[in-house]
Amino acid sequence: MKETPIYAVVDNGTELRCIDAKTGALRNVYRYDGVLASGPIVTADRCTVVIKKINTNSGMVFTLPNFTLTATFAV
């Protein structure tokens, strides 16, 4: 049976880092403009965040580990 990877996403203020929770290896980095208002929330292979910019809040859903943008929503 193939083992399902488990990811952790860490924010350092300007970027999100996808880390393999089993090995500790850095898998990918996503850099963003603005301030992280909510998240990161990781569920299975998805990560949800809300980024605050000057007058807007933008929600984004990514597929891990590549940070492929799969959905956006207004907050």
Image (cartoon, rainbow, N blue to C red):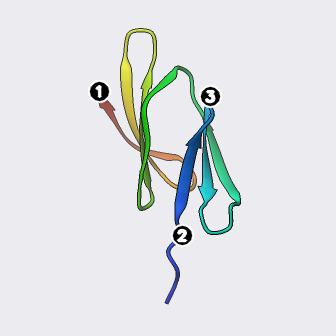
Q: Vertical placement of 8 versus 39: above or below? A: below
Q: Place residue 45 in its image quadrant.
A: bottom left
Q: Mark 2 near mark 1, Cβ–Cβ under 8 Å? A: no
Q: Vertical placement of 56 versus 48: above or below? A: above
Would residue 7 appear left or right of 61 to someone viewing this image? right
Would residue 54 appear left or right of 75 to someone viewing this image? right
Please state which of the two labelled residues, at mark 2 or mark 1, is closer to the viewer.
Answer: 2
Which is nearer the N-term, disc 2 or disc 1?
Answer: 2
Q: Residue furthest bottom?
A: 1
Which is nearer the N-term, disc 1 or disc 3?
Answer: 3
Which residue is depicted at the point 56% across and 56% down?
A: 65
- Does dot 2 land on a helix, a strand or a loop? loop
- Does dot 3 land on a helix, a strand or a loop? loop
Between the residue at mark 2 and the residue at mark 1, the CA separation in whole angstroms equals 30 Å
Which is nearer the N-term, disc 3 or disc 2?
Answer: 2
Report the residue marked by disc 1: 74
Which residue is depicted at the point 57% across and 52% down?
A: 66
Q: What residue type is labelled 3?
A: Thr
Report the residue marked by disc 2: 5
Which residue is depicted at the point 62% across and 28% down?
A: 14
Between the residue at mark 3 and the residue at mark 2, the CA separation in whole angstroms equals 25 Å
Q: Which amino acid does label 1 sit on?
A: Ala
Q: Vertical placement of 71 versus 19: above or below? A: above
Q: Which residue lies furthest to the right in this view?
A: 25
The answer to which of 53 and 8 lies nearer the viewer is 8
Report the residue marked by disc 3: 14
Q: Which amino acid does label 2 sit on?
A: Pro
Question: Local crowd at mark 1 within 10 Å, few (<14), some, or many (≥20)?
Answer: few
- Does dot 1 land on a helix, a strand or a loop? strand
Residue 11 in the image: state x and y as whole percent.
58, 37
Q: How many marks?
A: 3
